[in-house]
Image (cartoon, grey):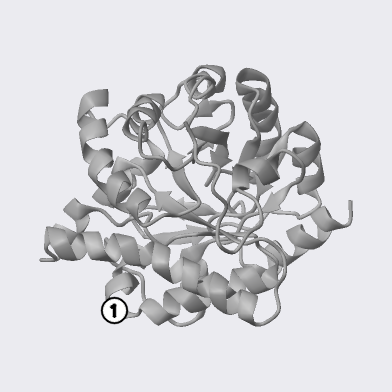
């Protein structure tokens, strides 16, 4: 069962808040760090700065809190024991860095509150897919050739460390494959921390090609899951996905798409133009979205616009 204990920086738990109002998520961590001049061109991506420049991660979180976000998603998306081991980082040190990702987000919330912010602030511990560790673009394809049991064994140790750091929620995000979602749902059982499950999609299917009805149905009866939805997808794919997630699961829906630009995994660069419009969030909210923000290439200015749009309703 999920915990109802509220964050020390919020009067209610996130699950309780979702029953009555929309909650604003942050935007892309990587683009905010790059805008501050940090080089993320290696396999650890933003997780590298957990070891080298933790203060930069606090600054990135604060930028989104100051823009109006209620939830900071930690920099642990690409942080795994296996990924750190490739850099010569021990298991013990990797566990410390995973815990640190939660601590840094919480510190950013404390600093934001000390400067006068009175709204509730929560921390979501990011759990990226197996493909993020591979850093070869397979996180946008799924179908890794691993069984559900293999994937559960991969995810569970990291989830245990992150849960022990006491985030408000675990963000099981950018999941490309229903098989991996099943593994993650198994892995979060008994951890005592609620979770949201968010797929990366293309049209009406997961990136691995499963129909969204089938993919969302996996979480319908999962007590640990407080929201289900999509992220790291094109904005134009969100509307239909929200409706399906709400209908199939009966749970609040989480949405945080990319800017609409396309990621070139070989060139490790973005191309195209942004199609993200803050006015779109009202339609998402009407369809059942309660956690709303942005993913890659969506920065503080866009999050501020989302916050203004939602609070003006």
Query: Crowding at label 1, few (<14), some or many (≥20) Cα neighbours within 10 Å?
Result: few
Say above or below: 67 vs 15. below
Task: Look at the image and tell me whether residue 199 can be seen.
Answer: no
Q: How many marks?
A: 1
Quadrant of res 228: top right
Task: Look at the image and tell me whether residue 202 can be seen.
Answer: yes
Q: Residue 216, how many percent across, how many down?
A: 53, 24
Q: Residue 283, how many percent across, how many down?
A: 80, 40
- Horizontally, residue 206 falls left or right of residue 253, namely left
Quadrant of res 312: bottom right
Say above or below: 45 vs 290. below
Quadrant of res 229: top right
- Horizontally, residue 87 falls left or right of residue 9, namely left
* Residue situated in front as seen by the camera: 52 or 206: 52
Q: Residue at x 76, y 60 (%)?
A: 307
**What is the secondary structure assignment of the residue under circle 1?**
helix
* Residue situated in front as seen by the camera: 40 or 107: 107
Q: Residue 147, how many percent across, how many down?
A: 23, 24
Q: Residue 101, how many percent across, how many down?
A: 38, 64
Say above or below: 133 vs 254. below
Q: Residue at x 22, y 39 (%)?
A: 154
Q: Residue at x 42, y 35 (%)?
A: 176
* Residue situated in front as seen by the camera: 189 or 244: 189
* Residue situated in front as seen by the camera: 57 or 146: 57
Q: Residue at x 43, y 53 (%)?
A: 125
Q: Which residue is mark 1?
A: 52
């Amino acid at each position: 069962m999920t915990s109802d204990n509220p964050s020390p920086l919020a009067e209610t738990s996130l699950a309780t808040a979702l029953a009555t109002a929309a909650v604003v998520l942050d935007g892309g961590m990587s683009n905010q760090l790059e805008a501050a001049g940090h080089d993320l061109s290696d396999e650890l991506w933003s997780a590298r700065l957990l070891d080298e420049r933790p203060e930069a991660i606090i600054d990135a979180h604060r930028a989104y809190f100051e823009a109006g976000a209620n939830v900071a998603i930690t920099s642990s998306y690409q942080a795994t024991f296996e990924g750190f081991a490739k850099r010569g980082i021990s298991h013990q040190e990797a566990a410390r860095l995973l815990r640190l990702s939660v601590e840094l987000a919480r510190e950013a919330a404390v600093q934001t509150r000390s400067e006068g912010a009175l709204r509730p602030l929560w921390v979501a511990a990011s759990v990226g897919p197996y493909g993020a560790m591979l850093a070869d673009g397979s996180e946008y394809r799924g179908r890794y050739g691993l069984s559900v049991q293999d994937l559960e064994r991969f995810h569970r140790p990291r989830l245990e460390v992150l849960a022990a750091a006491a985030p408000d929620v675990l963000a099981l995000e950018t999941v490309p494959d229903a098989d991996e979602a099943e593994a993650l749902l198994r892995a979060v059982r008994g951890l005592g921390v609620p979770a949201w499950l968010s797929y990366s999609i293309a049209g009406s299917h997961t990136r691995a090609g499963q129909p969204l009805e089938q993919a969302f149905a996996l979480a319908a009866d999962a007590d640990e899951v407080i929201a289900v939805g999509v992220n790291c997808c094109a904005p134009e794919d969100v509307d239909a996905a929200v409706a399906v997630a709400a209908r199939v699961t009966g749970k609040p829906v989480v949405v945080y798409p990319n800017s609409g630009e396309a990621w070139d995994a070989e060139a490790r660069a973005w191309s195209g133009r942004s199609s993200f419009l803050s006015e779109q969030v009202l339609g998402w909210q009407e369809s059942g979205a309660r956690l709303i923000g942005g993913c890659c290439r969506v920065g503080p200015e866009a999050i501020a616009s989302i916050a203004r749009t939602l609070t003006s309703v």
